[in-house]
Amino acid sequence: MTDKPVKPYALPATTDKLLGEIRQMIEEARAAVAATVNVGLTMLYWRIGGRVGQEILKGSRAEYGEEIVSTVSRQLEMEYGNGFSAKNIRHMIRFADALPDIQIVSTLSRQLSWSHFKEIIYLKQPLQKEFYAEMCRVECWSVRTLRQKIGSLLYERTALSKKPDELVERELRALRGEDRMTTDLVFRDPYLLDFLGLKGAYQEKDLEAAILRELEAFIMELGAGFTFVARQKRITVDHDDFYLDLLFFHRDLRRLVALELKLDKFRPDHKGQMELYLRWLDRHERKPGEDSPLGIILCAGKNSEQIELLELGRAGIHVAEYLTVLPPKDVLKRKLHEAIERSRLAVRDRGPGRDETGETPPAATVKKNLTVGQKARKADRDTRQPRRPGKGGKA
């Protein structure tokens, strides 16, 4: 007698739905447990690093620190496994030293893993560390993405890095406390477009076509929050038609972003063209609740003094270079640091007529903010300028 094959039992639709809901519960619970474990481990590593660091400071010899790390790691590895190797103990010491604020670490640990922190803590500048940590948190970067962003010198390419440290700190505090993105965090210079594969001579239409072909990679380079809207957007003013190369929308900034591509260096007339596009978009395309449109002019080169004199920031226009072939990293790094220094000097030496936001401060503030050179020039003018005669005709 042979057994009859058992037919698979067909689950009723209600059971299918039930299983789906249970699976979702299990996955959510797993994610919550993993997040809790990650927070617990991260805070444990921070506390261990801080405590071992305190002990090392008690020693007077350089070798004392290495002896402490070696002894502690050997014993902890025997009891708790490879997670407490000498190398990891050094990471923990660096962690506590690089990010000393426990509240900030606690907040970040809810979304950043130990692997994220290990990438961030070895950056040289405190503001760099804070920038990458907060952008990781806000944009949910993977460890791989974080490495790519650091490798491409993202911080040095943001408009933010070219501001004085106190302004950078202010914007990062706003990002940490309110998740508030600003144009200085979003815009970069230069943009790295080596993924387009353009070599030799090419025209604007080739550059535009390559961007659309590699749109996902291009938006990744622009940054999180950008959404593609249109190509060759027709703008009709009176009876004349103009065509905007690319139009995007940025979700965090709540603004349309117009992008123009230029094969040559930036010219002053590019500003007038972009201003026309932005005003048209503001009048005809801007939706209720959105802020005024912004413009990006991507060009092969630019003159810093022209950019400063034209006050493009006040018009909502960002001019940036693009690189279709990457130079060696050390060359790019040097050029970026030179650009940062030039921009910061320009901010410090800006005349008294406007503050960093472009607004005109009160007269008392203007007088107070005169630089030493400006005071000297003013004194020189006063001594050379003849005094006007008074009512009695006396000087």
Image (cartoon, rainbow, N blue to C red):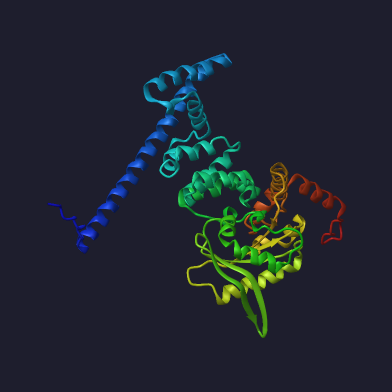
Residue 391 visible in the current orientation: yes
Which residue is pictured at 56% across the width and 43% down the height? 147
Left/right placement of residue 285 relative to residue 385 reads: left
Near-viewer residue (104 or 190): 190
Near-viewer residue (257 or 168): 257
Q: How many marks?
A: 0
Left/right placement of residue 5 relative to residue 146 reads: left
Seen in the picture, residue 53 relative to 380 is either above or below; the reply is above
Instruction: Find residue 193 and report its image quarter.
Output: bottom right
Left/right placement of residue 29 relative to residue 286 reads: left
Seen in the picture, residue 113 relative to 276 is either above or below; the reply is above
Residue 56, position as x, y percentages in the image: 51, 19
Residue 78, position as x, y percentages in the image: 39, 20
Seen in the picture, residue 34 relative to 196 is either above or below; the reply is above
Seen in the picture, residue 35 relative to 293 is either above or below; the reply is above
Residue 127, position as x, y percentages in the image: 58, 41
Residue projecting furthest to the front: 1
Residue 355 visible in the current orientation: no
Residue projecting furthest to the bottom: 239
Instruction: Find residue 103 and report its image quarter.
Output: top left
Instruction: Find residue 300 and report its image quarter.
Output: bottom right
Residue 37, position as x, y percentages in the image: 36, 38
Quadrant where the C terminus is found in the figure: bottom right
